Image: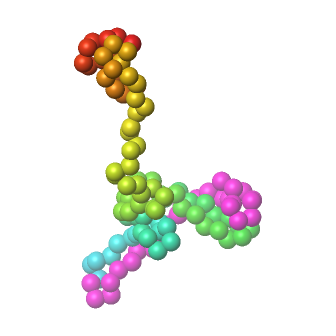
């Protein structure tokens, strides 16, 4: 892995996440790793150990977490469900004039085969 800050090779090893808890509830402790897009929580993982990388030159530390649970969507992934995403171009049947999707191999009205 190449460091994104200084461009030098990073050392691979074990990445550990500290365990957090609530002082009054000593039995309620949990590890958590979260990824944010701005202030919006997008993904989190309950793993406490994983493969990690460390740059000895600039001090960058990075862990690789597989199987994180997505909890939200960054703005660029959101889409209006009313968008015409699956609208195909149309064609006209030369036999009866019915307008149908371009991928129809046969006219459903008259049976004309394209």
Residue 81 as seen in the image, left or right of residue 2 = left
Whether residue 3 is visible: yes
Residue 58, x across and y down, in percent = 72, 70
The segment highlighted magenta reads: 1-25
Against 20, is 69 above or below? above
Residue at x-position 65% and y-position 68%? 60
Of residues 47 and 90, which is closer to you in this image?
90
Q: How many marks?
A: 0
Residue 41 as seen in the image, left or right of residue 60 = left
Against 68, is 57 above or below? below
Residue at x-position 38% and y-position 59%? 70
Residue 61, x across and y down, in percent = 61, 67
Residue at x-position 43% and y-position 31%? 89
Name the image colouring. Answer: rainbow
Of residues 101 and 8, which is closer to you in this image?
101
Whether residue 47 is visible: no
Against 109, is 12 above or below? below
Q: Is-magenta flag for residue 2?
A: yes
Residue at x-position 34% and y-position 51%? 82
Residue 107 as seen in the image, left or right of residue 2 = left
- Quadrant of the rendered structure where residue 28 is? bottom left
Residue 78, x across and y down, in percent = 42, 57
Of residues 36 and 11, which is closer to you in this image?
36
Residue 101, x across and y down, in percent = 36, 27
Residue placed farthest to the left in the image? 109
Q: Quadrant of the C terminus?
A: top left
Q: Is-magenta flag for residue 96?
A: no
Of residues 52 and 112, which is closer to you in this image?
112
């Amino acid at each position: 892995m190449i460091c994104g800050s200084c461009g030098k090779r990073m050392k691979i090893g074990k990445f550990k996440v500290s365990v957090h808890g609530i002082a009054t509830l000593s039995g309620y402790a949990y590890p958590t790793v979260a990824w944010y897009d701005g202030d919006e929580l997008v993904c989190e993982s309950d793993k406490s150990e994983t493969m990690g990388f460390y740059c000895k030159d600039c001090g960058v530390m990075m862990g690789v977490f597989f199987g994180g649970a997505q909890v939200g969507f960054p703005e660029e992934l959101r889409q209006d469900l009313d968008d015409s995403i699956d609208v195909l171009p149309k064609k006209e049947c030369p036999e009866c004039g019915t307008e149908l999707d371009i991928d129809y191999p046969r006219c459903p009205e008259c049976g004309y085969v394209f």
